[in-house]
Every structure is written in C-alpha cells, then in structure tokens.
Image (spheres, rainbow, N blue to C red):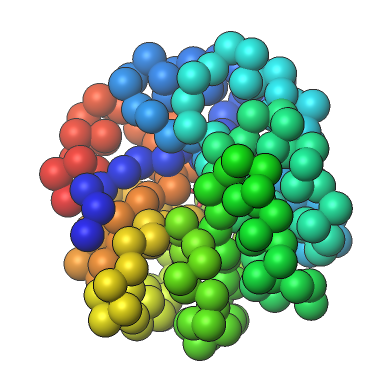
Amino acid sequence: MHAPLLAPSILAGDHAHLASSAAVVESLGLSWIHLDIMDGHFVPNLTFGPQTVADLRKGSKLFFDVHLMLAEPQRYLEAFAKAGANLISIHIEPSIDHADTLRRIRALGCQCGLVLNPGTPAEAVRPLLAAVDLILVMTVQPGFGGQPFRDDMLPKIQQLATWRREQGLSFRLEVDGGIDLRTAGLCRAAGTDTFVAGTSFFKAPDKPAFLRAIAAL
Ligand code: DX5
Ligand code: ZN
C-alpha cells in the first residue's frame, strides 16, 4: 500500500484568491492539490474551468489532481490536459465509454482515475481496475464541501483494497468528502492511501501538525 498522501481541496479555499490557496499548500511541502470541476448538471453546483487551472499552473509545481464532476467529461479532456492537469478523474455514473475515455486521458500524458458516488457499488468499476492509476471513493454526495463523512462507505473501500491486493494492482485508493483526522484514520484502516481534505485542511489552525498527523496514519 502507498504511504499516506494528503491532497487539499482548493474548493474550500478563497475562490477570489485560488493562487494563494495553492501557494499555502505548496509552501507546506505538500506535493498534491485536488481541483474540483463542477458543471451544474452532474452535480448541482458550479466551480471553475480549464482557464483557471491553466492560470494556477503558471504559479505552481504541485501535482494537479483534477476531479471532473461533469455529465460529459469526454468533451473536456484536452482542455484540462493542456491546462496542466497531472491526473484526471472521471465519474463512473455517466453513460459514456469509460475505457476509451481513460485511454484518451493516458494518451494526453495524464494519469487517469475513476470516481464512485456513494450510491454506486464497487462492482461498477471492477472491470476497469487494471486501467486506472487511482480509484476515488466519494464519502459524501459530490457537489459541496463541508458535508459529514459517510461511514457506510468503509466496506466499499475495503472491497476495492481487497481486489487491488488480489489482482496485484497498485492504483491509489483516494477518499473525498468529510475527511478529517478521525475519518482519515477510519479510511486508512480500510485501505485508503490518498486523502482529499477541503474544510478540515483550510480551517486547521496548525496545518503542519495536520499534515504530520496524516503522514503518520
Ligand atoms: C465535493 C468535492 C470535494 C470537496 C470536499 O463534491 O469533490 O473535493 O472539496 O470538501 P470537504 O473536505 O470539506 O468535505
Ligand atoms: Zn473532489
């Protein structure tokens, strides 16, 4: 299993100063940042698009973990790759050709990931586990930060971790939504290695202590 990795979600930062939020993450010595892209269709909220990602890229060396909450993600792959995404994750729920979309993400020079909403069973991504660099288990219904963690997602994480081990695969297992030090501990015990944290990270009074605690999980 990979060492614990913290990916702060810029969704919880100040959207008039996103570059400052990214700079806070980089100045702490972290390597990843999580960028939530919402289209108002797949989820009932809007965030920002490729231009914002490209402008953040100019001032940042962070690994951009781009989470596409889009009804038609296949239409925007080139734009986000060109903008500087390092990893692009797409949801399994839209009726698209996922295998082809993942191949296209790889062909654009990015790592690729698949995301499951809370209501989607682990079985939905099982045929594609060998085709991804990351599986993201949503631990809230996507669309908004600051929601409570759903501990009924823990068996799903355990199942995915089991299949990863059984199949000798090495994709990252990421969680997103309601992650704080307590819930990250639960997810770590279930097999998670990559922790998205929005509210808990940006509100943490002592950020170095927060990231030390994640690293020690
Ligand atoms: C939710 C987003 C998350 C969000 C998590 O739709 O995918 O990345 O930023 O926020 P917190 O950590 O506040 O639950
Ligand atoms: Zn996210």
The percent coordinates of residue 112 (x first, y second) are: 56, 54
Q: Is residue 12 visible?
A: no
212 and 62: which is toward the camera: 62
Determine the residue positioned at 32% across, 62% down: 170
Left or right of 178? Residue 106 is right
Quarter of the image where the N terminus is located: bottom left
Asked which quadrant contains residue 174, the reply is: bottom left
Determine the residue positioned at 32% across, 73% down: 164
Above or below residue 149? Residue 180 is above
Q: Is residue 85 visible?
A: yes
Asked which quadrant contains residue 173, the reply is: bottom left
Above or below residue 160? Residue 208 is above
Left or right of 103? Residue 87 is left
The percent coordinates of residue 172 (x first, y second) are: 38, 57
The percent coordinates of residue 140 (x first, y second) are: 53, 65
Above or below residue 175? Residue 198 is above
Number of disc labels: 0
Left or right of 109? Residue 201 is left
Above or below residue 32? Residue 127 is below
Determine the residue positioned at 35% across, 27% down: 30
The percent coordinates of residue 60 (x first, y second) are: 54, 17
Q: Residue furthest left?
A: 216
Determine the residue positioned at 53% across, 48% down: 111
Left or right of 194? Residue 64 is right
